[in-house]
Image (cartoon, rainbow, N blue to C red):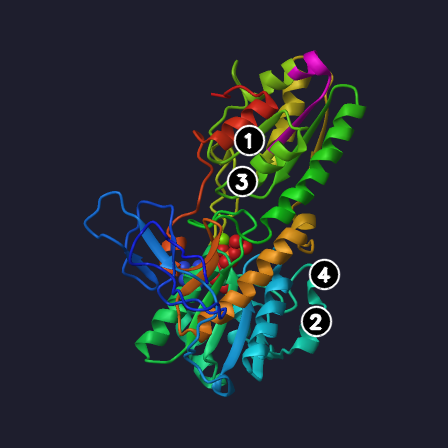
C-alpha cells in the first residue's frame, strides 16, 4: 500500500490499491509558497481558492498507469541551453535510458542549445543507451550549450519539420522562458508536443524547489577554492584571500560554501547590501582581522555589490546583463586601502567559476539528476506540457513553468541560515 501524500488534507489521497509503482493522478505535493499567481495553470490546483493563506499543490511526479503517447509514434529531442552546470550529462543520459525503457526508438539531441534548431550546419545527434552510457563520467554537456539563438516561431517550425513530439529542455530561467513560449506556440498551432523543462541552475535560485542539480557539487568544489585562498592568505604576511563564487541574484552558493568551509571571515551576497569604505565598511573590518589574526578570507557572490561598480549596460547573446567583476574590484580597492593607510597587505584573488561549472556531478547530484531525468520522461508520457520537474518538500513534482521562473529564489537575510552564516564568519553588518 502506498503512503498517501497530503494525508492531512482529505480528498487528495493516493489509492489504497496494491503497490504497483504507478503514481495516481490525484497524488499531490504541497507547495510551501503562499503567493501563487495563477493556481489554475498547468498542473497546479488550489484546494480552497477563497482561502487567503493559500495552500497549493502540484502533481506528484512519476510513472502513470495510462500513458498519452504510443512509444512507437514518439520522436523525442533533448536540448541543453545557457551555461554549463554539473549534472547535465547525467540528466541527458537518464532521459535517454528511460525513453528507451518506454520503447521509444527515435531519440535525438539538438546541438548547442536552441541555436541547433536553426543553424543549418548543425545536425541532430542520434541518441541511444549505447551513446550515453558513460557520459555522466565527465562534466559539460554531450550536446553542447549556447546562449541566444532563433525565435520561438522558428523553433516550433523546426519541431514540426523534424516531427518531434517530445522536447526535453535543460536550462535555467531563460531556457525555461523559451520552453514555455514553445509550449504556448505548440498549443496555438494545435500541435501535440510535450515540452518538459529540467531546471539547470547551479545558483539554486528556482522558486519552490528544495534544490536544483549542480548546486551540491558547486558547494563542494567551492570549498577547494576557499581552502586554497585560506592557505595562501594564512601563509603570507598579512594575507587576504578573495574568492568569487557563482550567484547572480542569489547567494546560496557563497553562503553554503562559507558555512561548510569554516574558513571564511566575510561572506558577501547580492541580497545583503554592504559598503566597502567607511567606518563600518568591509575594508575597515579587514584591517581589524589582520590586526587580530594576521589574515582574512572573503567569499563574494558574483552578483553582490553591483551597485558599487560602474554599469556598462553590456548584455550577453541571451539579453542578460553582463555583471562587473566584484572580485577584481574588491581586490583592487583592498590593495589601495592598505597602501593608503601604510599597512602591508598581500591580496590574492581566486575565481573558480569555470572550474566548478565544468565538474562532473557528485554523488548526491548524480542521484538528483537521475530521478529528474526519469520523471521528465514520465511527465511527457503522462501527457503534460509546459512543466518543469523538481524536488519540493522532499517530493518530486511537476511545476507549471511560469510559476517557477516568475522571479529568482533569494536568500532571506532574516533567515536562520543567513544568521548561522554570520555567526560562523563573525562578520558585522557592513552598512
Ligand atoms: P543560465 O542559468 O546558465 O544563465 P539560462 O537558461 O538562463 O541559463 P540564457 O542564456 O539566459 O540561459 O537563455 C538560454 C536560452 O534561452 C537562449 O538560447 C535564449 O535565447 C533563450 N531565452 C532566454 N530568455 C528567453 C525568453 N524570455 N523567451 C524565449 N527564449 C529565451
Ligand atoms: Mg539565466
Find out whether residue 204 is within the magenta segment.
Answer: no
Q: CA distance from mark 2 to mark 3?
A: 32 Å
Q: Where residue 421 appears, x then y in whole percent?
A: 56, 29
Mark 1 touches mark 3? (CB < 8 Å): no
Local SS, label 1: strand
Residue numbers of the magenta segment: 289-299
Mark 4 touches mark 1? (CB < 8 Å): no
Residue at position x 72%, y 21% in the image: 295
Label 3 belongs to which residue? 252
For label 1, count other residues whose C-alpha is less than 10 Å away and answer few (under 14), some (14-19) or many (20+): many
- Which circle marks residue 133 in the picture? 2
Label 4 belongs to which residue? 138
* Relative height, residue 77 to residue 217 (above, below): below
Local SS, label 3: helix
Which of the two marks, 1 or 2, is nearer to us in this view?
2
Q: CA distance from mark 1 to mark 2?
A: 41 Å
Is the shortest distance between ligand 1 and the CB of mark 2 under 8 Å?
no
* Relative height, residue 126 to residue 270 (above, below): below
- Which circle marks residue 268 in the picture? 1
Q: Where residue 143 appears, x then y in whole percent?
A: 62, 69
Residue at position x 51%, y 44% in the image: 248
Mark 4 touches mark 3? (CB < 8 Å): no
For label 2, count other residues whose C-alpha is less than 10 Å away and answer few (under 14), some (14-19) or many (20+): some
Mark 2 touches mark 3? (CB < 8 Å): no
Amino acid at each position: 500500500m502506498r503512503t498517501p501524500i497530503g494525508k492531512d488534507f482529505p480528498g487528495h489521497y493516493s489509492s489504497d490499491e496494491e503497490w504497483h509503482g504507478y503514481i495516481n493522478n490525484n497524488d499531490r505535493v504541497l507547495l510551501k509558497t503562499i503567493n501563487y499567481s495563477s493556481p489554475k495553470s498547468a498542473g497546479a490546483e488550489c484546494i480552497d481558492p477563497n482561502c487567503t493563506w493559500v495552500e497549493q499543490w502540484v502533481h506528484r511526479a512519476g510513472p502513470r498507469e495510462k500513458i498519452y503517447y504510443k512509444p512507437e509514434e514518439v520522436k523525442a529531442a533533448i536540448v541543453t541551453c545557457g551555461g554549463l552546470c554539473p549534472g547535465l550529462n547525467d540528466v541527458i543520459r537518464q532521459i535517454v535510458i528511460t525513453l528507451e525503457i518506454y520503447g521509444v526508438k527515435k531519440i535525438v539531441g539538438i546541438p548547442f542549445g536552441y541555436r541547433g534548431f536553426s543553424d543549418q550546419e548543425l545536425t541532430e545527434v542520434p541518441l541511444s543507451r549505447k551513446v550515453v552510457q558513460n557520459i555522466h563520467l565527465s562534466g559539460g554537456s554531450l550536446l553542447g550549450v549556447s546562449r541566444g539563438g532563433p525565435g520561438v516561431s522558428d523553433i516550433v517550425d523546426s519541431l514540426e519539420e523534424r516531427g518531434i513530439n517530445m522536447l526535453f529542455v535543460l536550462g535555467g530561467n531563460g531556457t525555461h522562458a523559451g520552453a514555455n513560449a514553445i509550449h504556448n506556440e505548440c498549443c496555438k498551432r494545435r500541435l501535440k508536443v510535450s515540452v518538459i523543462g529540467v531546471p539547470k541552475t547551479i545558483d539554486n535560485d528556482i522558486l519552490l524547489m528544495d534544490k536544483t542539480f549542480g548546486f551540491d557539487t558547486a558547494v563542494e568544489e567551492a570549498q577547494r577554492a576557499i581552502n586554497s585562498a585560506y592557505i595562501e592568505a594564512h601563509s603570507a604576511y598579512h594575507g587576504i584571500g578573495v574568492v568569487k563564487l557563482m550567484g547572480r541574484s542569489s547567494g546560496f552558493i557563497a553562503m553554503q560554501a562559507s558555512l561548510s568551509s569554516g574558513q571564511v571571515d566575510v561572506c558577501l551576497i547580492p541580497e545583503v547590501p554592504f559598503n566597502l569604505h567607511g567606518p563600518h565598511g568591509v575594508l575597515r573590518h579587514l584591517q581589524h582581522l589582520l590586526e587580530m589574526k594576521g589574515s582574512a578570507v572573503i567569499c563574494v557572490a558574483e552578483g553582490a555589490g553591483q551597485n558599487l561598480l560602474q554599469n556598462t549596460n553590456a548584455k550577453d547573446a541571451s539579453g542578460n546583463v553582463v555583471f562587473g567583476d566584484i572580485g577584481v574590484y574588491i581586490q583592487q580597492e583592498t590593495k589601495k586601502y592598505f597602501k593608503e593607510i601604510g599597512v602591508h597587505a598581500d591580496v590574492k584573488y581566486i575565481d573558480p567559476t569555470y572550474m566548478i561549472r565544468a565538474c562532473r556531478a557528485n554523488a548526491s547530484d548524480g542521484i538528483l539528476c537521475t530521478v529528474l531525468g526519469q520523471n521528465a520522461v514520465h511527465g511527457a508520457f503522462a501527457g503534460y506540457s509546459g512543466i518543469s520537474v523538481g524536488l519540493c518538500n522532499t517530493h518530486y513534482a511537476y511545476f507549471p513553468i511560469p510559476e517557477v521562473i516568475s522571479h529568482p529564489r533569494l536568500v532571506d537575510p532574516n533567515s536562520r541560515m543567513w544568521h548561522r552564516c554570520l555567526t560562523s564568519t563573525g562578520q558585522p553588518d557592513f552598512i
